[in-house]
Image (cartoon, rainbow, N blue to C red):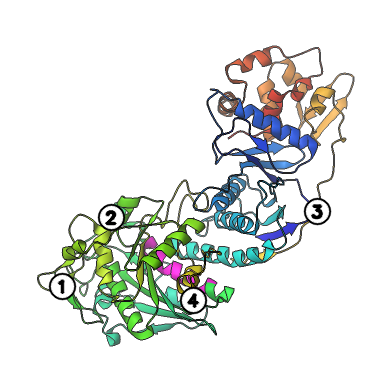
Amino acid sequence: MKTELSQKPVYKNGVYFFSCGGKSKNPALISECPAPLKSYLTAYLDAVASDSEKSRKIPADAIFSLFHPEMGRVVLASWDDTETGGGTAKIGGRVAKTLLKQKVSDANVIFPADKKYKPNDKSVFEFWTGFAKANYQLNKFTAHKGGGLVEKLNLYGAESSALKHIKAGEIIADAVHFARNTENTPGNLFRPSDFKKKQRGSPKNTALEKMGMGCFHAVAKGSSEKAYLNILKHSAKGASGTVMLVGKGLTFDSGGYSLKPAGSMEDMKFDKCGGAAVLAVMEAVARLKLKLNVIGLIPSSENLINGQAMKPGDIYTACNGKTVEVLNTDAEGRLILCDSIAYGIKKYKPDAVIDIATLTGACMVALGGYNAGLFSNDDKLADALFKSGENSGDRVWRLPMNAEYRKDIESTYADIKNVGGRGAGAITAAWFLREFVGDTPWAHIDIAGVDSDIKHVDYYPDKGATGFGLMSENAKLILQGKEYSLPVNIGTEQEVCVDISQLRNQSGAITMDNGFANTGSCFSSITYLDGEQGILRYRGYDVNELCEKSRFLEVCYLLLYGELPSQKDMDDFESNIKRHTMINEDYKRYFDVWPHSAHPMALLGSSIAGCLLFIRIH
């Protein structure tokens, strides 16, 4: 996506903002725009505000997709940058999803001009990041590639200093999309060895047996695919301290002999989301040239069944010497993570360890799809991760780790067992991992509920992988105590270009009567054939004839969509009009008094007809 901070507004295919906050009955347009368009948008907001019950208010996340004959597709969005969890990022995500549905490839954002709402550099960056994260389509494996993405984005009303943040954001968005593409790839097309192929550079891959990783090897031996511990390093001169990231990279999980139900197995390509997040974060850290020392470990394997696969009741020895009794072969993620964590701590002696994994269904039950589970032995680290999540929108919620939960993983036959009881499964899984970190500050993020198919979050795709992951700035915050400033969430390198082409003023191209002119616009594709008889044609249809036959709704549909509707389309259109404009139950009264003695387009100047004609209702 090509992005420019423009010194002049471009109004065509524009995104405009209004203040609402969910409390005001009188929403106000706060973006700059030409007077005729401002009148048109203000009339629409007034109509929406007056809709149905007087007590009804426009929600704070409202967004409307409109159509203007001169300005093209117009998006009108509520501006509320006070929302927690990346307020302006949510707005950016909402706008991007709306433009994607309308197949707009070239969009222009007109930020609020009012000093009260004018965004600072951080808000612009968050808006852009939310937009870029949502500007994504999953069509890699289909013959039909869909309508495409927003290719060009022109931002007006932002300071030039915001550009440096956006350039960093391009790397962030690149990494987010890279992670999603990796996560969405099915198990037959992405094997454990593909983590090695995805890495740019020469990561180190180590043989499990030689390192004494009995737990990791127990999972891997059920598959004919070789397993890998992928080790990535980023070092910077002058950086103090080291953070180690560990991501679960299970490319497919059948559950092993503790076989998953069929309905729970089809999405197991997402069991590598933790590994994909670490891979993407490491790439972003390197490209941003952050002054951090970061180690990334990605244990990659499959969990399948053959004659060599681990069995319930087996006991294996981890690389730190602890013995583990396997009671459930479907609790395999903690087995590949525990060896990786213990190995990394012993070898690299990091100042902090953060692991991320789709670890337990129990976490999804506890928190649903809007917060990842956070577990930690260090309050400072946990607080830093929580604040980062709130700022970036990749939210986490800390769950307890009372010492009593540790007793649930005690084993009769080994040091520990890989599952506890039926209750608190996410917590006992975290306690299992804690057995391998010693005194090192550590945090575990369970993303089982937020890895894919998350609806109602504006910057995540409704279907497929979310790209939920760690923010690389966490490491700087943790080690240097700095406040969070740059959310690094993570793949397609963006370019910055210049596009300052202006919309030609065609407001006088066709002269209509005063009623039509009051709408502040004209249809350049309408042909005015005979001024005395008032004959109008649009795309081959005689508009005058349709109006005389009281087919006014069909005229509105024709001018909005370029064709006459089917009966079903007409029913849906009429229903939307009743629901979304001030006409409601009285709408027929306005159409029944159609002024046949006047020009057939005269009524289009009214606020009611303006709403119908120039706005595509959703």
The residue at which mark 3 appears reads as 501
Labelled disc at residue 362:
2
Q: What residue type is labelled 4?
A: Gln
Quadrant holding the C terminus: top right
**Figure check: 348 above or below 413:** below
User: Which badge, 1 or 3, is on the more N-terminal residue?
Assistant: 1
Disc 1 marks which residue?
Answer: 314
Q: Which of marks 3 and 2 is nearer the N terminus?
A: 2
Viewer-proximal residue among 363 and 316: 363
Query: Is residue 502 found left or right of 107 in the rendered image?
Result: right
Sequence-wise, the earlier of marks 4 and 2 is 4
Q: Between marks 4 and 3, how big is the CA–CA gap?
A: 40 Å
> What residue is disc 4 on?
199
Mark 2 residue type: Ala
Picture quadrant where residue 172 is located? bottom right
Q: How crowded is mark 4: few (under 14 residues within 10 Å), some or many (20 or more)?
A: some
How many other residues sit within 10 Å of disc 1, few (<14), some (14-19) or many (≥20)? some
